Amino acid sequence: MKNKGPISDFIVKNYKHFNAATLVDAAQAYEKQLELGNKMMITMAGAMSTAELGISLAEMIRQDKVNIITCTGANLEEDVFNLVAHSFYKRVPNYRDLSPQDEVELLNHHFNRVTDTCIPEEEAMRRIEKHLVDAWVDAKNKGERLFPHEFFYKILKSGQLEKEYQIDPKNSWLLAAAEKNLPIIVPGWEDSTCGNFFASHCIEELIHPGILKGGIEYMMFLADWYQKNAGENGVGFFQIGGGIAGDFPICVVPMLHQDLQLESVPVWSYFCQISDSTTSYGSYSGAVPNEKITWGKLHIDSPKFVIESDATIVAPLIFAYLLGM
C-alpha cells in the first residue's frame, strides 16, 4: 500500500474478515484496474445523493477515478436539491417510531421523507422545476433534443444556481461531473420527481416529449462509448445498490456480442456490488456475480465482489481508500 492516509491504514489493519475483508479486496482490485489503465463505471441506485455521497464521489470524479456514471433519475435530481436547499432539509432521527399521523404531518408541511431525511418540496423540488422548465421551453423553441442529465448540466454550467448554493459546491457530485462533462446514463428517468414535472408540463402542452432523449438513445450512446473506451481489457463496473441503475448498463456488453455480433468487444473487466439484497427466488439485485457469466456480462476470470452491507457506510470508505485518505 502506497501513499495512503489514516482511513486506508485503519481499514487495511482492521478489516480482515467477512464483508469487511471483501471491502478491502474490492477497493484494492478497483485501484488495480486504474493502474492497468482501465476505465471505471459507477452505478447508483437507492438514495445515495440524499445520503450526501457527493462528499466523496465528487473528489473521485475530479481525480479521474470514475469515467462514467449510471444513476437513477432520483439520484440525478437529489444531488441538485441538496445543493440548493440543504438548510431547509429536515432530519428525523427517530423515523422508525413515526406513526401514520406523523407521516401525514410531514406531508402537510410539504416534507417528502427519505428514511431519516425529509426533502422540502418548495425550496428544493419546485425551485429546480422552475429552472428546468425554462431549459425545456428553450429547447422546444430551438428544436433541440437533449438527455435528462444534459438539461441539468446546462443549468449548472450557466451559473444561474450559484447564488442559491447552500453547501460547499465541491461536495456536489453532479456539479463535479458537469465541470468534467462526464458521461452519465439515466435509464428510466421518467421515474423521478423531475420526470413527473416533465410529464405534467407535456400534458399541459407547455412542452412536448420529443425534446427529451430517452432510454433507447441512452443505450445507443453507451454502446458507442463502451466500444471507444473498453480497450483490450474492458471497463470496470462498480455497482451501488440494485435496480435499473445496475441492470441497464451492464447489459450493453451482451447486446454488443449477441445482438450486434461484435466478437472483439471485451466483457466488463471488474465487478463489485454493494447491496443488502439477498439471493433468492430470481432476485436480480441479489444474484451472485457468477450468474452474470451465463449472460455474457463477465468473464470467468473477472475480479468479482459482493459486499453485503449498507452502501452509505461502505462506498465512502472505498472511495477514501482510492483517494489515499
Image: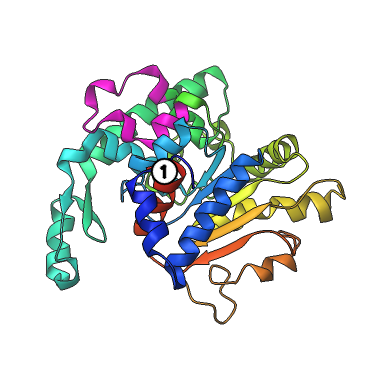
**Amino acid type at mark 1:** Lys
Q: Residue at x 87, y 50 (%)?
A: 261
Does residue 201 appear in the picture of this structure? no
Q: Quadrant of residue 19?
A: bottom left
Given residues 47 and 305, the one toward you in this image is 305
Number of marks drawn: 1
Q: Residue at x 16, y 41 (%)?
A: 88
Residue 9, x across and y down, in percent: 38, 52
Does residue 313 appear in the picture of this structure? yes
Q: Quadrant of residue 87?
A: top left
Which quadrant, please, contains the C terminus? top left
Residue 246, x across and y down, in percent: 56, 56
Given residues 301 and 128, the one toward you in this image is 301
- Which residue is identified by label 1? 4
The furthest residue to the bottom: 281
130 vs 29, left or right, is: left
Given residues 89 and 43, the one toward you in this image is 43
In the rendered image, residue 201 lying in the magenta stretch gets the answer no
Q: Residue at x 26, y 61 (%)?
A: 115
Whether 282 is drawn above or below 296: the answer is: below
Report the magenta residues as a range: 155-178
Dominant secondary structure, magenta: helix
95 vs 308, left or right, is: left
Bin the neighbour count of mark 1 within 10 Å (Cα to Cα): few under 14, some 14-19, many 20 and up. Answer: some
Residue 266, x across and y down, in percent: 78, 49
Given residues 113 and 202, the one toward you in this image is 113
Whether 173 is drawn above or below 93: the answer is: above
Q: Residue at x 15, y 50 (%)?
A: 90
